[in-house]
């Protein structure tokens, strides 16, 4: 598992679109598997789940992105998982870290 979290500054919907574009354009085999959106008052929450094939690991890796806007604050959590071929412990986490790297530079421009 690889994880990235940050508080961001900017338009919620612009950040969401930028992150989605980064995932899809930076990985030939990435696909949006499912999504969920919720809002109440001025609070917005978007959850996106992506998956891709990891050539280095020879398996599939998933990435969950949760973007939350509450009042004037925006927070993002990105967590990748999968990719290991071992039964009892993780041997290969390169695919998870590599998938995470596809969005970090896109997120960094909004980071506080």
Image (cartoon, helix red, strand yellow):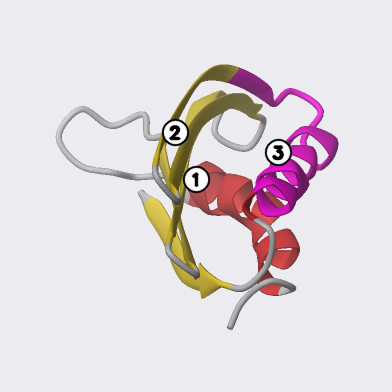
Q: Residue at x 54, y 33 (%)?
A: 57
Q: Residues within 10 Å of mark 2 (few under 14, many from 20)?
A: many
Who comes first in sequence, dot 1 or dot 2? 2
Dominant secondary-structure state across the stretch colored magenta? helix
Question: Which structural element holds mark 2?
Answer: loop
Image location (x, y in percent) of residue 17: 74, 42
Q: Is 108 on the left-hand or right-hand side of 46?
A: right
Choose between 38 and 77: the one closer to the eye. Answer: 38
Q: Which residue is mark 1?
A: 96
Residue 5, placed above or below residue 58: below
When asked about the image quadrant of residue 99, the answer is top right
Q: Residue at x 41, y 54 (%)?
A: 2
Who comes first in sequence, dot 2 or dot 3? 3
Who comes first in sequence, dot 3 or dot 1? 3
Image location (x, y in percent) of residue 18: 76, 49
Q: Which residue is mark 2?
A: 83
Q: Which residues are magenta?
A: 13-32
Q: Residue at x 81, y 42 (%)?
A: 26
Tag 1 near tag 2, CB within 8 Å: yes
Mark on residue 20? Answer: 3
> Spatial distance from mark 1 to mark 2, Cα to Cα?
6 Å
Q: How many numbered marks are there?
A: 3
Choose between 1 and 56: the one closer to the eye. Answer: 1
Choose between 27 and 21: the one closer to the eye. Answer: 21
């Amino acid at each position: 598992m690889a994880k990235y979290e940050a508080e961001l500054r900017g338009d919620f919907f612009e950040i969401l679109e930028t992150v989605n574009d980064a995932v899809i354009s930076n990985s030939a085999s990435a696909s949006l598997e499912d999504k969920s959106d919720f809002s109440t008052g001025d609070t917005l929450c978007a959850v996106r789940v992506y998956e891709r094939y990891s050539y280095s690991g020879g398996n599939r890796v998933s990435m969950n992105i949760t973007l939350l806007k509450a009042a004037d604050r925006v927070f993002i959590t990105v967590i990748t998982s999968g990719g290991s071929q071992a039964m009892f412990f993780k041997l290969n986490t390169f695919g998870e870290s590599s998938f995470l790297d596809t969005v970090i530079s896109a997120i960094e421009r909004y980071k506080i």
